Image (cartoon, helix red, strand yellow):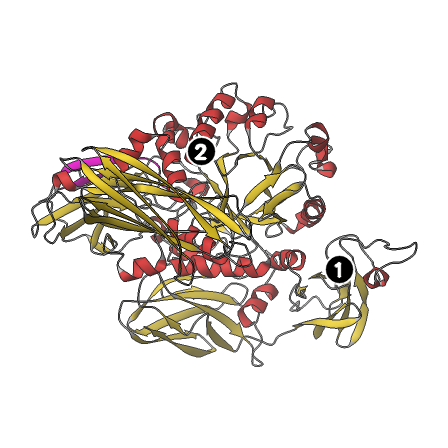
Amino acid sequence: MTSGISRRDFVTNAAIAGIATTLALDVLRSSAHEAASGGSERRRNFDQGWRFSRGDFPSASATAFADQSWQAVELPHDWSIAGPYSKDEPCGGSGGYLPTGIGWYRKAFTLPSASAGDRVFIQFDGIYQRSEAWLNGKPLGMRPNGYVSFAYDLTPHLQPAGQANVLAVRVDNSLQPNSRWYSGSGITRHAWLVTAAPVHIALWGVCVRATNVSRQSATLEITTRVVNDGAQAAACRFDASVYDSRGRRTGTAIAQSQIPAGSQYAFIQSVLIEQPALWDVSDPQLYSLVASVHAQGHASDQVTNSFGIRDARFDADRGFLLNGERVKLNGVCLHNDCGAVGSAVPERMWQRRLELLKDMGCNAIRTSHNPPAPEFLDLCDSMGFLVMEEAFDEWRQPKLQTPDYGYHKYFDQWSVRDLTGMVERDRNHPSVVIWSAGNEVPDQTDPRGPETLQGLLDILHSGDPTRPVTVGCDNIAAEPRAALPEFLAKLDVVGYNYVDRWRERRELYYAIDRHDFPQRRVVGTESESMGGDSTRRIAVEQLQKYVQNYDYVSGDFMWTGIDYLGEAHWPNKLATSGVLDTCGYPKDGYYFYQSLWTNKPVLHLFPHWNWFGKEGRTVTVMCYTNCDTVELFLDGDSMGVKGFAFPRPGMSGKYGNYPPRAKAPQTTADLHLAWDVPYAPGMLKAVGVRAGEIVATAEVRTTGAAAGIALAADRSRIQTDRADLAHVSVRIIDAAGLLVPTANDRIYFELSGNGRILGVDNGQPDSHEPYQASERRAFNGLALVLVQSTGQAGPMVLRASAASLLGAQIEILAG
């Protein structure tokens, strides 16, 4: 990673009806608000009051098992992130050298009085992995996949109202390695308790599809599965009411049907919306569908689903179209961990990271390589991201990193159920514009691969005929075995992982297949990023030129938007391909994409200018910019004017008529500028000019010795729930207040008030310091503290100190 200048800048500035029936209830998508408030009347948050212990306890499913000595925890919970790191951990570098194994969770709870025949369900949004559950000693079931949401019917095993029940969950992540990246271990996502009448809406039973979309009108096709678990047939009335973002009712539909006992019925309705507010990346307008069921003349069930009205499609010639307009997918791949908290991620952490990516110009996310938490998609809906939601990293054929215990071990038995659950849970999200059935699956070269793919296509197309399906293919044109033509021909959109890997494709990219398959719709599902190895800079720049210039390429998802745990080699614990580090601090490459993907003036200068002992030696000074020209100065002396133009402007109107920007000096065809400067302590200053006007300046100064600590919080006030937190940036500064980019002082933290330090981080790839701690060594002069309320309103004060440095403190208000 390039040193700390960029980080400093940031801190300062129904197909499967039987399966569907067993799943039972629709549950509102998890959101920060709902987790905070405890849920709705129908569904309440079930995150608190759990006890946990590492290890295996054969009798822990029994109601009378003594768990008083176990650790009290709240969900989401990831026990692996607590460490310690060990080179000998069975998960190896894939799992970030962190512990895995087996763990147990138990929770005692009582239910208030309920109406006769009511059903009670537990929903888990994700448990990694191989989870088994029991209620009052009775087995509920097992799920091997750690990323899918699922529910169990508790009703047959519940104690009478007012008496204690015990829910026990065994999590087995001991079969290692089972993942190619850090997965975390435990109940890593939210849990919900749902109570419903005998006649209720099925799990993920509401499907809203917008058809014939224009700015004048749109037709909503609403399909809702209603289940009758009662002993008698029920005469049902179903109401579907649509509300816009301001709470105004914009449409309604009513239907009636008799539903026999022990069966379900699909209500199919149509609602016309006049002058719809279309969902767009720049204006993500959302609607709500309130679905209500009346049985035998009485209110029985009601759920609310958020959705958006938009037309999204992939075109062989024009690329990706949103509401008829061409939009280039400027995308990043993301894993499901967030640094110091592992895979148990508070919603605010994802929100902040998505805000940073949005500011970079990113408009698309690939959920590599599994379904994300529901609240992540809620954020993408409300913030205007386009999502490629991915299902699997393995099908029937194993990968080299997981030869024994990868998902291929469960594919034949579980893939139908897992994929059905994904599409039914997430098909109402307007952010999701394409499904990915898999990533780099070896099945793409296997004779059975096309048949396997067809089965997955059938599930996705049946559950959601509105969205295309892709696969991230890394063996297109590969040698000695390439992806089978019949495999690629089945895909709605062909996904290219590292399109430039083979032979002449290094220069020609998609052009060869564009010639041979002109009707093929294409997207770059994975490519190298500017976040890791700087020697790849030219390759990344040239690919971006091609992607941005050719309309038929829908876009590209670079690997990765953010550093992530795993896929590392000791002593590193994490992969450094992200343009944001695990703290969320931008690296230099962040500004490359910002200069290309946004129109606002960008001028970023690097590296730092603290090269003591190298006076007189040449240092290459780099610049990412979208200015026409940049002039660099060292202590007022010009180092020269340089510039590039992309795309290069041509003549228009008549011969010799060039736009003004074409007359600016163009010293390179690359997408960065560089000067070779003899090092001398002082100040580098860059001046950026666009259309003849100075639009941006940037400075990098030689700093003095480390003198103190500076603290800054992303927000001075946070909520009291566990979904929220404050990110407190920690900077080592000199006497003039400048970040010292070479400082690595150990910093000690103390928090007073009704709060806790959730984690500390510094983004350093090879640091083996624990995340759950009250101290951290700075890296490139920076560290991060995550501060969270313990549930009570009031002020919290974070104090930071270090040997020989002036300390600092900051107040954060909860409530």
Horizontal side of 791 relative to 524 (left or right) equals: left
Check disc 2 and report its element: helix, strand or loop: helix
- Camera-side residue: 32 or 727? 32
**Image vertical order of residue 724 relative to residue 811, above or below:** above
Q: Amino acid at mark 1?
A: Ala
- Camera-side residue: 223 or 570? 223
Give the labeled residue for mark 2: 460
Q: Residues within 10 Å of mark 2 (few under 14, many from 20)?
A: many
**Image vertical order of residue 716 relative to residue 306, above or below:** below
Residue beneath the point at 33% across and 44% down: 126
Q: Amino acid at mark 2?
A: Leu
Q: Is residue 142 magenta?
A: yes
Give the labeled residue for mark 1: 674
**Nearer the N terminus, badge 2 or badge 1?**
2
Quarter of the picture containing the N terminus is bottom right
Measuring from the top left, give residue 792's x and y in whole percent.
26, 71
Q: Main secondary structure of the magenta part?
A: strand
Given the current orientation, which residue lies at the most extreme right position? 655
- Camera-side residue: 458 or 184? 458
Horizontal side of 210 relative to 282 (left or right) equals: left
Residue beneath the point at 41% across and 28% down: 408
Q: CA distance from mark 2 to mark 1?
A: 48 Å
Measuring from the top left, give residue 46's x and y in whole percent.
24, 53
Q: Is residue 697 visible?
A: yes
Q: In the image, which residues are magenta?
A: 132-146
Quarter of the picture containing the C terminus is bottom left
Measuring from the top left, give residue 517's x and y in whole percent.
68, 29
Residue beneath the point at 84% across and 53% down: 650
Question: Looking at the image, do the residues carrying marks 2 and 1 touch, with CB atoms under 8 Å apart?
Answer: no
Q: Is residue 707 magenta?
A: no
